[in-house]
Each structure stands twice: as structure tokens, then as C-alpha cells.
Image: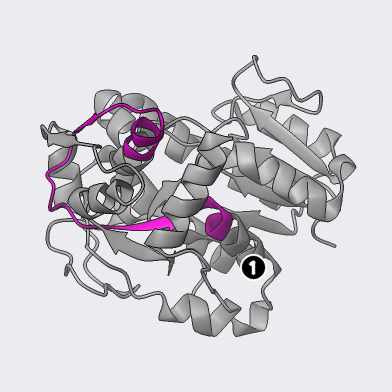
Amino acid sequence: MAFEKILITGAGGQIGSELVPYLSEIFGRDRVVPSDIRSDLKDSRFINLDVTDKSSVDSAIEKYKIDTIFHLAAILSANGEKNPELAYKVNISGLYNVLESGVKHKTELVITPSSIGVFGPETPKEHVPIETITRPVTMYGITKLMAEHLGNYYHARFGLNTRGLRFPGLISYKTPPGGGTTDYSIEMIIDAVRGRNYKCFLRENSKLPMMYMPDALDSLLKLAEADDSRLRHRTDFNVTSFSVTPSELEMELREYYPSFKVTYEPDFRQQIADSWPWSLDASAAVKEWNFEPKYNLRKTVEDMISNLRN
């Protein structure tokens, strides 16, 4: 039975650091095994795990009798362009090790987030469906697209219950930005609250889909708990809450901080952003597992400011 013992890889990252307490509250602390390659994490439950080491992954799943895996260990878009070899090693070899061990130990469920990074310049820009042109131009996007196919393969070939969703940009006040192209949104809000002006690394009109972390956590659990018989898709569900440009976020923040100013100096991340769609069609997630985001732009900014002030 799934959720008796849950392994979270990459638990020290942006999603993992919030998924650990979220799942612990729902299923109990003793059922959640957080893991990361970092050794500076304070939670006593954390185990040191390098997902690129196949024997270590295998040993952890066996030792803790893992039946459910949330595989979050990954190198993100901007950092992946700085070190593509590492991105490939972590994002592909790491996933392969998890899937192989999952089959070996008859793991009940493997959840692996994908990303809007799977899309590319030839992808339509508005209301993009699941089935569309996917020709990514970053190592991160290439690895995430391959991960979707690997997940589908292991389900079809070995019967492994793999599931995944394509996250848009994620916004959170609890963890610092982790090397993603949409991290400007977090940085801009933090600087506004701290009384600082902000220099944005994207153009003011760079529209991208976004999601607030509470909705992201909810979507991961909803997909994990979904009735398998309802799932026509498996590893590539589009999810999104709203789309926004840097200038629109700036205007929203000025409702709270009238003197707040942003300057725009695009860097190499602009080319990555230009290859991604402006908005996503999440209707399959709604139909197949009741995806229902609660935070629009205004509610996200309001909640971010409230928590950052505290």
C-alpha cells in the first residue's frame, strides 16, 4: 500500500523543503524519509543520498522499506546551462537509478515532476496542450523531456506506477531561489518587501506561467492519490495557476510599495524564457485528477508579502 514509507529525494531543494513538512503533517513524521546530497540540513530524519550513485539509491529503498518516492533531485534550467554535464548526470542518471530500484523493490508509486522546460521555440505560445511540439533548447528541458519518456517506458514495460506533472515557475517565500529562469518573481517580491529596488534579468514583457507553492504541493499529492483508472496521461500533466510578466508583477507590488522600482537588464536567461510558452492548458489535470489551484497573482503576492513581513 502506497504512502506507508515515503522517500523524498532532493528534499533540501525548493519543492522538497516544503513537501517534507507538508507530507509529514498528512501522513506522520515517521512515514517520511527526506534525503539530499547536502549534509547541512538540520532535520534529524534526513539521510545523505546521492541519486547518481545507484547502489546508494538501492540501499536506501531497501533499508527504509520505501513504497512511495517523490523524486525531486534535479539541476534547474539556468544552473543546467552553466553545468550541462552535471544536469544530465543528476536529471537522467539519477532518475534511471530511482526507476531501476523502484522496479527491483516493487515500489508502489514514483512521482517525478517535469517542467515547462520541455517546450521550445516552436511550441505554440498560448494555452499550450499536453500533446504539442516539444523541442527544448536547454539541457534542463532535454533531460525533463527524456524523464517523461522514461517514466512512460517504465510504466509500460515494467508496470511501475509512474506519474508526473509539468510545473511552471514556482513562487515561494520559504526557500531561496534555486537557479531557475522564473526565479525573478521570488527575488522581486523579496526585494520589494525588504525596501530594495530590483534589477530583473528578464525583459519586462516576458510572460510566463506561474504557480504558488501551496498549489504545487497540493497538485503533487492529488496526482499521487489519483485513481489510476482515470489517468489517460501519466508523466506529463500541464499545471498552472496564472501567467504574468515582470512588469505586471512590478505593478502588483506597487500597490503595496508605491516607490518600488525595477530596472530590466536581460541576461542569458532571457533566451531560455523566450523558448517557453506564455500559458498552459491544464484541462487534462482538471479532468483526470481534479487539479484546482487556489492562488491567482493577487492572492500569491498578498500571501508572500504577509509571510515575508513576519
In the image, taking residue 242 as reference, residue 71 lies left or right, namely right
In the image, taking residue 25 as reference, residue 303 lies left or right, namely left
Q: Residue at x 30, y 53 (%)?
A: 252
Examine the image and state in which quarter residue 241 appears.
bottom left
Q: Nearer the viewer, residue 61 or 168?
A: 168
Q: Quadrant of the N terminus?
A: bottom right
Is residue 198 shown in magenta? yes
Count neighbours of disc 1 (C-alpha within 10 A) and say few if under 14, some if 14 to 19, many if 20 or more.
some
Please state which amino acid type lies under the numbered disc 1. Lys
From the viewer's perspective, is residue 221 above or below residue 89?
below
Is residue 77 shown in magenta? no
Residue most toward the top? 40
Q: Position of residue 31 (x, y in %)?
A: 85, 45
Colour setup of the view:
one colour
Q: Residue at x 30, y 62 (%)?
A: 243
Q: Position of residue 294 (x, y in %)?
A: 53, 68
- Which residues, given as a range, are shown in magenta? 188-216
Q: Residue at x 35, y 31 (%)?
A: 191
Q: Quadrant of the C terminus?
A: top right
In the image, taking residue 68 as reference, residue 1 lies left or right, namely right
Q: Position of residue 105 (x, y in %)?
A: 77, 48
Examine the image and state in which quarter residue 125 appears.
bottom left
Mark 1 lies on residue: 222
Q: Nearer the viewer, residue 120 or 252?
A: 252
Q: Position of residue 118 (x, y in %)?
A: 30, 55
Examine the image and state in which quarter residue 214 appears.
bottom right
From the viewer's perspective, is residue 162 above or below residue 34?
below
Q: Secondary structure at mark 1?
A: helix
Could you tell me if residue 249 is visible in this image?
yes
In the image, taking residue 300 as reference, residue 136 lies left or right, namely left
Q: Residue at x 49, y 75 (%)?
A: 285
Could you tell me if residue 149 is visible in this image?
no
